[in-house]
């Protein structure tokens, strides 16, 4: 169905192809959820041990079962060592490829696990009071890293590596800090003013440069899309929209986020 729509209705095809931005939403949500967990437990004596134990038990068993299924039953060959250490995104970026079709989505999991390695250290070493400045600096560095990758001809590196996607992750962490510090309502006010112009800008950019590997999209588009998603998250996490019908799906999403935070 998708190829038929793309071929017969190009504009509709472009809109449907924008589903790739879901990974940016995933990163924003991850930064928000994991950042919130770490900030609430930063003074615990077993801070690192509990965090890494819970992350490993939640992710690695299913991940390794998936790898065994593909390498033993589908590919019928030995497992590549980069998958075991979750550094496949570095290997693919070095070869300027997206990765094999069956396991290509695991690049986002690799980015996620690499993010887990640095965020607890940033929070402990920098302390929560300094976290906003750290987040803003890293968000600003992400487009610069992507510019270097694009100019060097490594567009896949801009898409696959943590330094190129840390703007989305640290937007989420910044919002988590706002919630933990009692600034959630203030963040929602900022988001309310920013969400419409950001949404319009993202829509125009996405329609003109709808490929995730387009240089214009890579340099500034990822950051704009992530900023839009964090604005949506900021609003739905503090309000039900005054009961307006068009806010109900967002209110339901907010309830889901609250459940995820308590579950983690």
Image (tube, grey):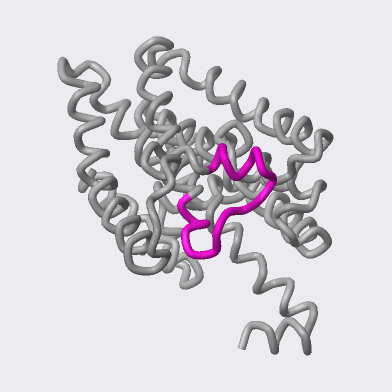
| Residue numbers of the magenta segment | 89-106
Q: Is any part of residue 235 visible from this angle?
A: no
User: Where is residue 120 drawn, in percent x and y?
Assistant: 35, 23
Residue 64 visible in rendering: yes
Taking the image as shown, residue 101 lies to the left or right of residue 197, namely left
How far across and down, in percent of the image, does residue 25 sit? Answer: 52, 52
Left or right relative to 217: residue 32: left
Observer-nearest of 120 and 159: 159
Q: What's the residue at 56%, 50% (across, down)? A: 24
Q: Nearer the viewer, residue 27 or 248?
A: 27
Q: Residue at x 50, y 70 (%)?
A: 246
Q: Determine the residue positioned at 74% across, 40% down.
A: 154
Main secondary-structure element of the magenta-colored stretch: loop
Residue placed furthest toward the left: 45
User: Which corner quadrant of the image does residue 210 belong to?
Assistant: bottom right
188 is higher (above) or lower (below) than 35: below
Up/down of 113 relative to 221, above or below? above
Q: Does 206 appear in magenta? A: no
């Amino acid at each position: 169905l998708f190829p038929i729509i793309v071929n017969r209705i190009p504009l509709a095809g472009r809109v449907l192809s924008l589903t790739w931005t879901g990974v940016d939403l995933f990163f924003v949500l991850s930064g928000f959820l994991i950042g919130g967990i770490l900030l609430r437990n930063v003074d615990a004596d077993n801070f690192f041990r509990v965090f890494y134990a819970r992350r490993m038990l939640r992710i690695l068993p299913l991940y390794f079962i998936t790898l065994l299924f593909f390498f033993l039953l589908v590919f019928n060959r030995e497992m590549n060592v980069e998958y075991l250490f979750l550094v496949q995104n570095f290997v693919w970026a070095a070869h300027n490829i997206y990765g094999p079709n069956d396991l290509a989505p695991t690049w986002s999991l690799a980015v996620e696990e690499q993010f887990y390695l640095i965020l607890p250290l940033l929070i402990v070493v920098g302390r929560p009071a300094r976290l906003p400045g750290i987040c803003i600096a890293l968000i600003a560095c992400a487009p610069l890293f992507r510019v270097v990758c694009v100019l060097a001809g490594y567009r896949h590196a801009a898409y696959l590596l943590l330094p190129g996607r840390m703007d989305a992750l640290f937007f989420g962490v910044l919002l988590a800090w706002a919630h933990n510090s009692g600034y959630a309502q203030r963040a929602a006010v900022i988001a309310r003013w920013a969400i419409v112009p950001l949404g319009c800008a993202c829509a125009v950019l996405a329609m003109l440069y709808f490929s995730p590997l387009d240089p214009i999209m890579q340099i500034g588009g990822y950051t704009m899309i992530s900023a839009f998603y964090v604005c949506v998250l900021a609003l739905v996490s503090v309000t039900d929209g005054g009961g307006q019908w068009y806010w109900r799906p967002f209110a339901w999403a907010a309830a889901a986020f609250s459940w995820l935070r308590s579950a983690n």
